[in-house]
Amino acid sequence: MFAALIDLTSILFISLPIGCAFIASRGSKYGFVIARSISIQVGVIAALVGAIFMLGNASDLDALYPATSILLLAFVYVFVVFGVATLVVNNSEITLPAVFQFKFLLAACFIFLFDLISVTADSLIAFFDFGSGLFLLASAGCILLIGVATDSKNVLKLVANSLPYAGLIGLLIGFVLCLAYADDLTVIGPALAFGFNSLLYTNCVSVFIKLAKPCVNHDSEVIGWQYGVFVLVGIGSCWALLISLV
């Protein structure tokens, strides 16, 4: 029974970015700070990759439930990582390293991108959405403008912390479009793809910034379990709607 709780693909997909946190910090305890900062987002990315794959096979209901269980496993794993990292950070004196070596940051970013590409390579076209790309650019642009207008001391930190919440707006827009055109199946698929990909893009960029510029994780707002739960509810609501219409 408990064998169902083990999925090697999910473990590998989640382990690599978490490992990147320690590569970027050169194995120091600051890696726990980065891991805590990105772990929930990594779970969201894994779940969205699974959801987008499932979207292409939504008509096969027999395969939908096993795929959903694997999707949920990603959150089980990252909640464990988040809990461990939080315990270590809250019970240790961890200081921001004076210097981060470029080669370690480059290696961490490369491994993260390789992880993403290797998982999505089989159906790469499903992860390209023009509207989601525009949404990402518009969101990042607005955040940058706000940062400049308010004289933010660290604009990159503002972008990294704000983009995941902008992605939630994209997910909600996709869900609203699904409800507005519930009688038109030709609209529902693209609407869900927009919502899922918008959330995926914004979290990927946010995690990339946190790995490339680890100092943005210092004294930063943590994307916590509440964010993960909200995403789970959002994805579940989208699937419930889709199943009722298929």
Image (cartoon, helix red, strand yellow):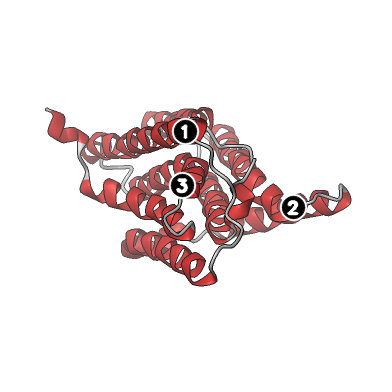
Determine the secondary structure under disc 1. helix
In front: 143, or 167? 143
How far from the left and from the top, in percent, is residue 65? Answer: 26, 34
Determine the secondary structure under disc 3. loop
* Type of amino acid at the residue the image marks with label 2: Asn
Q: Name the residue under label 3.
A: 29
In front: 197, or 26? 26
Q: Name the residue under label 1.
A: 86
* Type of amino acid at the residue the image marks with label 1: Thr
Query: Which is more N-terminal, label 2 or label 3?
Result: 3
Res. 235 visible in picture: no
State which quadrant residue 235 falls in: top left
Q: In this view, does 132 lie above or below 35?
A: below
What is the distance, in whole Å, between disc 1 and disc 3 at their CAs?
Answer: 12 Å
- In the shown orientation, is residue 12 left or right of residue 155? left
Q: Which of marks 2 and 1 is in front?
A: 1
Query: Which is more N-terminal, label 3 or label 1?
Result: 3
How far from the left and from the top, in percent, is residue 38? Answer: 49, 45
In front: 29, or 208? 29
How far from the left and from the top, in percent, is residue 101? Answer: 53, 68
Mark 3 and mark 2 residues within 8 Å of each other at the beta carbon: no
* Type of amino acid at the residue the image marks with label 3: Lys
Which image quarter holds the C terminus? top left
For label 1, the crowd category at 10 Å Cα-Cα, with few meaning under 14, some 14 to 19 and many 20 or more, is some
State which quadrant residue 79 falls in: top left
Which image quarter holds the N terminus? top left
What is the distance, in whole Å, between disc 3 and disc 2 at their CAs?
Answer: 23 Å
Q: Name the residue under label 2.
A: 154
For label 2, the crowd category at 10 Å Cα-Cα, with few meaning under 14, some 14 to 19 and many 20 or more, is few
What is the distance, in whole Å, between disc 2 and disc 1 at their CAs?
Answer: 24 Å
How far from the left and from the top, in percent, is residue 179? Answer: 55, 32
